[in-house]
Amino acid sequence: MSDDDNALDAIIIGAGFGGLYALHHLRDGMGLNVRAFDGASGVGGTWWYNRYPGARVDAPSSPFYAYTFSQELVDEWTWTETQTSQASVLAYLEHVADRFDLRKNIQFDTWVTDARYDEDRQRWTIETSTGQTASAQFLVCAVGALFVANKPDYPGIDDFAGACYHTGRWPHEPVSFEGKRVGVIGTGSSGIQCIPEIAKTAAHVTVFQRTPQYSLPARNRPLTAEELADSRADWENLRTSMRRRGGWPFKTTRRRSGDFTPEQRHAIYEELWEGGGIHLAINSFAGVLSKKDLNEEVSEFVRGKIREIVTDPVTAQKLMPSYYFGTKRLILDNGYFETYNRDNVSLVDLREDPIASFTPTGIRTQNGEHPIDILVLATGFDAVSGSMLNLNPKGRDGISLKDKWASRFDNYLGTTIAGFPNLFMIHGPGAPGVFFTMPLGGELTTAWIGDCIRHLRSNGLGAMEATHAAENGWDREINDIADRTLYPYTDSWYMGANVPGKPRQFLGHLRGSQYFDRLTEVAEEGYVGFVLEPAHH
Ligand code: N01
């Protein structure tokens, strides 16, 4: 790779779904000179790191959790299950990297340790963990919305002398739980996916739960040849539906709860539960995530299911969630609640029996000692903003992102930041991120970034930068949407509430389709909300 300082048009950080497509689009679609960097030794991003047992996409994903841009790619890749496993997604991304010859422009095992904007040259210069520097006019940060591991800050946690794994940094070599006593802290998607798998071979699993969850049956099953063939044949329409329907091709219901009796509503919940729990949220009645009474009815329905499944009433009671259904990330499981009926699984409710200390051989809670050989931290991520702050780019006047975002993650359109010209984020704060299908969201965002670059280049412009006023307007816009729902009531990673000291702010855009319309509108109106600067050279 050439290090000619002026040769690069764009630097991409990250080789996950977002970064790989950005590389393909900017390089092959637009003919730009692009280089990508990733600290991992291979492609995959999230799917490179999250290799814990049971890791799957947390949605009825196949064949929709995939790139949509190439019919040939759709035709040649065969998804096998409705809820795609981590290994399948990673194999797919490796195939994509090979098929589009992406690896030759990706430098692996290389962390970007610094990124600075040079106002005179209108270029970004990066430094890497391998001691290199590189510069480019545009910096595309595809650094992952769920990347920076959130390790609990319990005093003395390092006193535990056994093996300790975070689900988001799972080792590449197989981890055997055979005959081991395993402690799992955390019951989000990752914990709920891995606990049933670990319990199959471990001597004992002790789950340390802080907040009980509404987990729904994934109903994972083989994808039939007919389903696959149909989706391929109708791909263009599916793609359009996904774009129009919040990232997934599923229709959301407009059914009004008031038009049905409680018994009729219950029958509908039953049917949706049997068909795959996710539909309780999107297909039961309009307003489940915004009307408290309706939400409580669905919440109680799920609590009833937990009571039915878990045979020990004391354990079932500890598993009763009380926050508004759906306001934390919905979890799809494969036998999670059933796992508590096994003799080798026990549950510690940290709200009534908090962790007191760690010992070399286990965890001591207020009420007793829990001997463990392996500790699994399924404690999530410093989500959405964490990986940008980890990069901590320095923008105009050398201002660091850490300073800029000390109390609020100000941004415009979820992709740009005032004071950081020519820097683009994929799935940053203020973008739909996990509220849309992330591969398609990445494609649409990248297409918009490409259009920005084209606009600058064809108009003799050298830089674009969001204004502070545009950031404020955007903040209001996304919060107005969130405030019409029940999301802000709940302490979730969506609100930044899972990381001690993190500013509380809704971190996404809840209406993905509307969001991408807004991006188009901003471009069509001549990049309203941006200062466009003439090219200096
Ligand atoms: O993380 P989480 P995750 N002491 O933040 C608990 C995506 N994902 O890795 O709820 C004790 O959801 C915490 O408790 P509480 C998906 O979008 C995607 O499971 O904060 N417990 C919670 O139970 C998902 O939403 C796929 O009270 C502590 C758990 O740890 C996101 O990743 C697969 C604690 C963390 O849950 C994150 O999921 C899996 C402490 N100090 C996940 N700190 C794919 O599809 C935290 N907890 C790619």
Image (cartoon, rainbow, N blue to C red):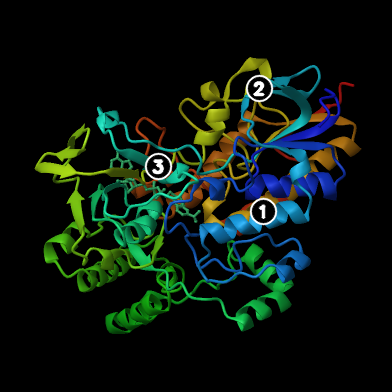
- What type is the residue that disc 3 sits on? His
Q: Secondary structure at mark 2?
A: loop
Q: Quadrant of residue 157?
A: top left
Is 365 on the left or on the right of 290, as rendered?
left
Instruction: Report the quarter where the N terminus lies.
Output: top right
Relative vertical location of residue 138 with respect to residue 272 in this rendering, above or below: above
Residue at 34 percent across and 80 percent down: it is 270
Q: Is 197 rendered above or below residue 46?
A: below
Give me the residue at 54% from left, 58% from top.
Answer: 87
Instruction: Write down the residue under mark 3.
Output: 166
Mark 2 highlights which residue?
395
For the C terminus, which image quadrant?
Answer: top right
Residue in the foreground of this view, choosing between 380 and 531: 380
Q: Are marks 1 and 3 in contact (CB under 8 Å)?
A: no
Query: SS at mark 1?
Result: helix
Per the image, the residue denoted by label 1 is 94
- Residue under the image location 73 percent in, 69 percent down: 76
